[in-house]
Image (cartoon, rainbow, N blue to C red):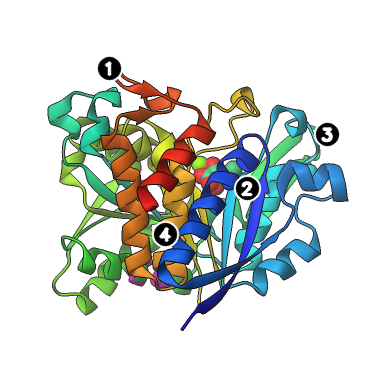
Amino acid sequence: MTQQFRIALLSGDGIGPEIMAVAVDVLKRIGQKFDLQFDFEDAMIGGAAIDQAGTPLPEETLETCRQSDAVLLAAIGGYKWDTQPRHLRPETGLLGLRAGLGLFANLRPAIILPQLIDASSLKREVVEGVDIMVVRELTGGVYFGEPKGIFATESGEKRGVNTMAYSVSEIDRIGRVAFEAAQKRSGKLCSVDKANVLEVSQLWRDRITALAADYPTVELSHLYVDNAAMQLLRWPKQFDTIVTGNLFGDILSDAAAMLTGSIGMLPSASLGEGGPGVFEPVHGSAPDIAGQDKANPLAQVLSAAMLLRYGLDQATAADQLEQSVLQVLDQGYRTPDIMSEGMLQVGCRAMGEALLKTLD
Ligand code: IPM
Ligand code: MG
């Protein structure tokens, strides 16, 4: 029997529409193969929404997302909106979407594919076999803490303020997601904080340590964030699952992504309690190459695979899609960001066509 799913498509800005077009084609083909019917609905977000609707996250967009089974997001942002006031910035739309859907858990896998080892700026022996899952808290911490703003002091000097805060329930729920992820992987979890300086991190460390009692098969360790950044570059294979707060996770997930050679390869899943998840590449909107058919659509396609796996519970279809990505790489196709000697350089569209061929 055909299964039906509603998928909200948020293409956003820059290279977003190009990479989204590839992912949608590929999903349609996967749907035919696995008897899944996808009803796609486009909605506006980011700069495109600012230009058309005067706000980076129109209410209809949030509504469309809430009524979907899963949300596929491409990328937001661009130079054009960088100097706007905060409420008219594309990023505010993304943060509003995360908060509006309660997506507190962000899973960012960083896997080095054997085909792309030479694209990494690190030595082969350092990155070969790297397979890390960064579990980033996504709706709390300094991104959302109050008070926040730019205030005038008594002397009239301006002062910018953000607040890094986590409550026990916020730490516990992301902690449990991470322990469960680690359980399903190799059983190693490293919690990253700055407990030598920050009270909020001390509470984080205390709670994560307490939770460990419920997961006796998981080996828990802790690192300060500065050391974690260093260790990620020094010997990344010591890591399996990493759990950390919003800001540290933002930074460390970019570092982890780069181990794999190109941030253009990495998908992510943002999940909440029950409602639809948002699946998006880790990379941004790359305005410098937008509209030139140079973008790498593979992170978007791998995000669609995560959507199938975590959002719609269609593991076999997800496996197939991930296999297709490996296949096109085996066939030598490379977009400019992952190009190396002897390979076949293609654009975004041609990469999409190559993917479709592997699915025929
Ligand atoms: C990310 C991005 C976002 C973040 C920006 C675009 C708001 O860097 O998803 O990592 O900081 O969370
Ligand atoms: Mg980031």
Residue placed under numbered mark 3 in the picture? 156
Mark 4–mark 2 distance (CA, rounded to whole Å)? 32 Å
Mark 1–mark 3 distance (CA, rounded to whole Å)? 62 Å
Mark 3–mark 4 distance (CA, rounded to whole Å)? 50 Å
The tag earlier along the polypeptide, 1 or 4, is 4
Q: Say which amino acid is labelled 3.
A: Gly
SS assignment for the magenta stretch, majority: helix
Q: Residues within 10 Å of mark 2 (few under 14, many from 20)?
A: some
Is residue 133 or residue 280 the one in the foreground?
280
Mark 2–mark 1 distance (CA, rounded to whole Å)? 49 Å
Residue 320 in view here = yes
Q: Say which amino acid is labelled 2.
A: Asn
Residue placed under numbered mark 2 in the picture? 162
- In this picture, residue 174 sits left or right of residue 53: left
How far from the left and from the top, in percent, is residue 311? 47, 69
Vertical placement of residue 300 versus 275, above or below = above
The tag earlier along the polypeptide, 3 or 4, is 3
Q: Is residue 173 magenta?
A: yes
